[in-house]
Amino acid sequence: MSCIFCKIAAGEIPSATLYEDEDVRVILDLGPASRGHALVLPKRHFADVTAMPQRLLGKAMKVAGRIGAAQKKAFGYEGFNLIQNNGEAAGQTVFHFHLHVIPRRSGDAAVGLWRPGTVTPEEMAETAGLIRQEL
Ligand code: AMP
Ligand code: ZN
């Protein structure tokens, strides 16, 4: 496999590692949105969230919470975003599941979130129905 995150997670490529256990490695992102921006990587290869086993998803979220709390203590941050991209259209560039932990201060522009749109109750009911039938 030529997956770069497999190699990093396995320790074959050096990384700035914040935490490691039998399931995950947490590294600093090479292109940080803010100082301390981290990535939680499972050690096994899964392309995206749809391929991830439930236990590892729980583990990744739990570890991400600990990392966010540590970023806050280390640098006096006030909060953090957990961001996880699935598919090229959604901004995924490395196709090995990873969970971003991005520390934040109020008023920073580290992460561009969405602008709220508008929707009618009828549209919401139709939209909910169309998604529900695919579950
Ligand atoms: P995404 O766009 O969600 O797929 O995120 C991929 C992230 O991986 C980006 O934030 C990159 O800066 C980061 N990245 C890519 N290659 C490396 C690497 N070798 N070490 C650390 N971070 C990386
Ligand atoms: Zn991989």
Image (tube, grey):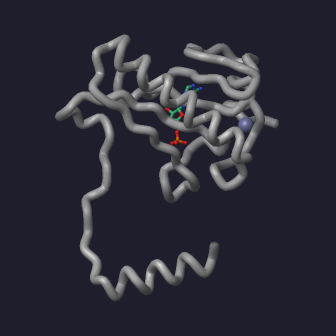
| Relative image position of residue 63 (x, y in whole percent) | 57, 28
| Relative image position of residue 85 (x, y in whole percent) | 52, 48
State which image quarter holds ligand 2.
Answer: top right
The residue located at (73%, 28%) in the rendering is 23
The residue located at (44%, 86%) in the rendering is 126
Outermost residue to the left: 107
In this image, 45 relative to 112: left or right?
Answer: right
In this image, 105 relative to 39: left or right?
Answer: left
Quarter of the figure that contains the N terminus:
top right
Quarter of the figure that contains the C terminus:
bottom right
| Relative image position of residue 79 (x, y in whole percent) | 32, 30
Q: Is residue 121 above or below residue 85?
A: below
Q: Looking at the image, which is closer to me, 10 or 61? A: 61
The residue located at (75%, 39%) in the rendering is 45
Outermost residue to the top: 74
In this image, 55 relative to 127: left or right?
Answer: right
Q: Is residue 58 above or below residue 30?
A: below
Q: Looking at the image, which is closer to me, 34 or 61? A: 61
The residue located at (69%, 33%) in the rendering is 42
| Relative image position of residue 10 (x, y in whole percent) | 76, 22
Q: Looking at the image, which is closer to me, 74 or 114? A: 74
In this image, 31 relative to 98: left or right?
Answer: left
Outermost residue to the right: 1
Q: How many marks?
A: 0
